[in-house]
Amino acid sequence: MKMTIRQYKTKITINHKLLISMVSVAFAIFLTGCGNNYKQAFDTNRTASIFPEYYGSTLPENIAPLNFIIKESGSKFRVEISGSSGKPIVISQSSPKIKISLNDWHKLLESNSGKTIRIDILTRTGKKWNKYKSIEHQISTDTIDPVLVYRIVNATYLKWNKMGIYQRDLTCFEETSIIENSSTDGGCMNCHTFSKNNPSKMAMHFRIIHPGTMIWNNGKLTKTNTKTDETMSAGIYPAWHPDGIHIAFSTGKISPHLTTRSDKPVDVADKASGLFVYNSEKNSLSTSAEISTIRRESMPEWSADGKFLYYISAPEAHKGDDESLLHNRYSLMRIAYDPLTEKLGNAEMIINADSTGKSFSMPAASPDGKFMVCALTDFGYFTIFHQNSDLYLINFKTNELKKMELNSNTAESHSSWSSNSRWLVFSSKRMDGVLTRPYISFIDSTGTAHPPFLLPQENPEIYDQLQANYNRPDLVTGKVELSPIEIRNLVMGEAQNAEMEK
């Protein structure tokens, strides 16, 4: 029976659709066989190795993306970041370097504030996909101060001709220089500090070349020489009083010291030291016999209410005995202070080093007045050189001293609180035991430290490429609105001499 033209065309159309369908099925089977079906991945039952090691931390919802490198072999990599709310972030690529969209990341964290996000990692080797255990991060409803200020200095201490103070926007990856010493004839710059996390109240030292202390106070920029006939040196370690007027400084004779110990070849010798308080409005100094004794007083820190000045104190150094400069232990002390009269009270012992067998350094009081973090080591106080230095927390309500949960088996040193007392940024050498990097930990209302995370970078390889230390990381509530040119011009000028009040 002959077919009509319409019947013939219909048959061709059906056969064509059938052929397309068969080809599609065959192609899908081919792709599955080639390993493109990640949904049928092999469960490795282990966590993927990644760098930095971002595992199970508590994150502020305003933090920049935690970009990382997958340290597993593979020809293709798939990452899915998801939460109970919001649109998941999916990254599928041939490179193991994972860069997360800034906008998508912030949307996801905002949608899951107070909840958990999950990171699922898959890798393909040959025709097989491998699936790893999910990595989970808790997203805190407490935000972190948006700017981190730090000094970057070469890993070798012979190269002081290249360093700078930088500020980093923690909500993204923008880093700008506050000042680099290439513009100030290569002198040393250090010990930047702020009043109550306020970027408009800043102090920092310039040493060796064009020496002096820069004070930035609500739009007024000055350079001061705090060395007087009554002080052993210009100010060294600083701490702003909560009133934003007074700054406590240590003064003394300190120097690098080479040792014969393989675990600590370099240290800092504190030959003599004491304390004074500087009035930034009157350009004057004040002190008392209580904090200028034959003992060594150093590392000042104010209580949150400004009523007490905390500091560390060690016995008098023995002349000619360099080892005693390093092997003495420092106790934690405090003294009452009245900022209106600038009078100091009687010094009192808070924790005696002999009772702990440890030496105190770098006290940092939380803005809410509940806690203080100190670095404790076996001897001395310059903890950046001490591999056994750990951070301890003092609970002022219970007077309990406890070793914090965030420590590693390498040196932990300087720490700084966020203005809401929920985040602590600190220096650590845990990555390689050599270079100091900034880590951030959530501190809950009980003083418990959650697993810390490394400062995120747009290029996570930067920590392998930059052979330098991040020193004294400090959190502030906004950008320091000072240009490098303004600071350079100030540094190149003469310093105003401060005077000791009689």
Image (tube, helix red, strand yellow):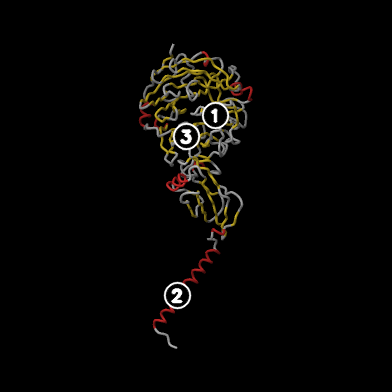
Distance CA(mark 3)–CA(mark 2): 68 Å
Q: Residue furthest bottom?
A: 1
What mark, if any, has residue 12 been given in the picture?
none
SS for callout 1: strand
Note whether 48 is above or below 376 in the view shown: below
SS for callout 2: helix
Rendering coords of residue 232 (x, y %): 49, 17
Image quarter in which the C terminus is found: top left
Query: Label 1 amino acid?
Result: Val
Q: Residues within 10 Å of mark 1 (few under 14, many from 20)?
A: many
Of pointers 1 and 2, the one earlier in the residue sequence: 2
What mark, if any, has residue 373 been given in the picture?
1
Left or right, residue 405 beside residue 159: right
Query: Label 3 amino acid?
Result: Ile
Image quarter in which the N terminus is found: bottom left
What mark, if any, has residue 16 been given in the picture?
2
Of pointers 3 and 1, the one earlier in the residue sequence: 3
Viewer-proximal residue, 496 or 195?
195
Tag 3 and tag 2, C-beta contact below 8 Å: no
Can the viewer see residue 59? yes
Q: Which numbered mark, 3 or 1, is in the foreground of this view?
A: 1
Query: Which residue carries the number 3 mark?
Result: 152
Q: Residues within 10 Å of mark 3 (few under 14, many from 20)?
A: many
Distance CA(mark 1)–CA(mark 2): 75 Å
Of pointers 3 and 2, the one earlier in the residue sequence: 2
Query: Label 2 amino acid?
Result: His
Note whether 123 is above or below 199 in the view shown: below
**Residue at horizontal 51%, vertical 13%?**
289
Viewer-proximal residue, 420 or 297?
420
Rendering coords of residue 335 (x, y %): 52, 18
Rendering coords of residue 399 (x, y %): 58, 25
